Amino acid sequence: MQWIKQRFARETGQQSEIKARHYLQENGLDFHQSNYHCRSGEIDLVMRDGQEWVFVEVKYRSNSDYGTAAEYFHAAKRKKFTQAVKHFMHFHHLNPAMVAHRIDLVAIDGDQIQWFKSV
């Protein structure tokens, strides 16, 4: 039974990331990569907004009984995400002091999408 829940959660997460990617592309961002993994954590989407790198966390909640999707990007998650961004930039020889970049959040609550820039 547990593996069914895990598979459903994984598929829901993938669908949410695809939905977020399309939304961001429709709003002018260019796709670079999805699901960047490192020891520090994971970056759901890596996009470009002109010359600026955009690192995107995607959160999905089917309902808000236990909080909205945006509320699930809490301080501990942000810290891990920031570490993963640092790893990505180091791995790709991008100096954070010299290369424009930001962290965005795409929060999906049911069918509603919210895009928070520079969180």
Image: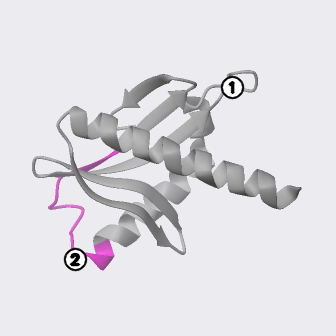
Horizontal side of 36 relative to 111 (left or right) equals: left
The residue at the point 45 percent across, 46 percent down is 17
Query: Residue 42 versus residue 40: which sits nearer the camera?
Result: 42
Residue under the image location 79 percent in, 55 percent down: 4
Does 22 sit above or below residue 34? above
Does 39 lie within the magenta span? no
Which residue appears farthest toward the right when viewing the image?
1
Quarter holding the C terminus is: top left
- Label 1 sits on residue: 67
Which residues make up the magenta segment?
90-104
Amino acid type assigned to the residue bearing label 2 in the image? His
**Residue 69 image offset from top left, x and y in percent:** 58, 31
Dividing the picture into quadrants, the one containing residue 64 is top right
Camera-side residue of 47 and 82: 47
* Quadrant into which the N terminus falls: bottom right
Label 2 element class: loop
Give SS at disc 1. Answer: loop
Residue 16 visible? The answer is: yes
Between the C-alphas of marks 2 and 1, the distance is 38 Å
Instruction: Please give left or right for residue 118 compared with residue 61 in the image.
Output: left
Task: Give the image location of residue 74, x and y in percent.
Answer: 60, 40
Q: Quadrant of residue 85?
A: bottom left
- Residue 104 in sight in this render: no
Please name the amino acid that badge 1 sits on.
Gly
x, y percentage for residue 28? Answer: 17, 37
Q: In the rendered picture of this protein, how many numbered marks are placed on residues? A: 2
Label annotation for residue 49:
none
Within-10-Å neighbours for mark 2: few <14, some 14–19, many 20+: few
- Residue at figure coordinates x 68%, y 23% from the top left: 63
Which residue was labeled with disc 2?
A: 93
